[in-house]
Image: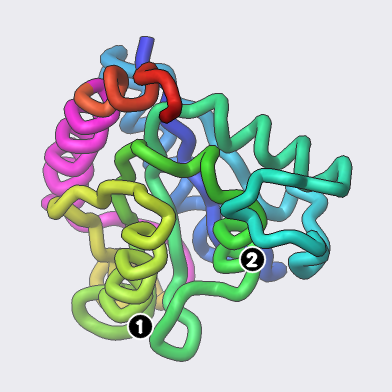
Amino acid sequence: MTKIAIVLGSTRPGRRGAAVAQWVLHQASARGTADYALIDLADVPLPNLDEPMPPTMGLYQHEHTRAWAATVAEFDGYVFVTPEYNHSISGVLKNALDFVYGEWNDKAAGIVSYGGGDPGGARAAEQLRLILGELQIADVSEQVALSFRTDFEKSSTFTPGSWQPRALSKMLDQVETWSRAFEPVRAAPAE
């Protein structure tokens, strides 16, 4: 079965992303069409990027990098749950993306963003799309954008709008389809 990781891209105390990621995991798992797992970057012991060689070379020197590479490689696709910090993604998500390279390649991804503006976290999602392209991850066009104004009661308790499950379902349809479509590309022998 296709394996898709939901990557929670915030480690802040009191973060709103934990509730969002749990909602995505619950909705996705109930579909029964792929195997979903949550990767909480708060549980991934990565320091600031400390590899001496560029990740594109795949010559990882540190055990934490090799462990992270194995985790990333395990999945066929990803759903990134990202906050918007200063019109971009969080530093911890950028660091996690930068640590490895080949393990991300030829896979699909969807984005669930959240933030104060409308649509929620849109600028973070746009920044993330640029990074995903460089990592050879195909990001799908459907996106879930959660606003503190409409999807969080009193800007803190996650209460997604009635339209959000449908938006999430459409995005997951694309992530699953694209993840399966890339299987032959990932299976092709390296030249």
In this view, the residue in front, 152 or 2, is 2
Q: Main secondary structure of the magenta part?
A: helix
71 versus 35 height, above or below: below
Magenta highlight on residue 173: yes
Q: Please give the name of the residue rendered at 20% of the width and 24% of the height, measured from the top-left corner.
A: 181
- Badge 2 is on which residue? 95
Q: Is residue 191 left or right of residue 151?
A: right
Give the magenta range.
156-180
Q: Residue furthest bottom?
A: 86
Where is the C terminus found, in terms of image quarters?
A: top left
Mark 2 residue element? helix
The residue sitting at 42% across, 42% down in the picture is: 105
Residue 112: horizontal and vertical position, in percent? Answer: 33, 56
The image shows residue 56, relative to residue 2, as above or below, that is below
Q: Is residue 135 visible?
A: yes
User: What's the distance in space between the residues labelled 2 and 1, CA to CA?
Assistant: 23 Å
Q: Is residue 176 above or below residue 54?
A: above
Identify the disc placed on residue 30: none
For marks 2 and 1, the one nearer the N-term is: 2
Q: Nearer the viewer, mark 2 or mark 1?
A: 2
Q: Which residue is under mark 1?
A: 116
Does 37 appear in magenta?
no
Q: Residue furthest front?
A: 191
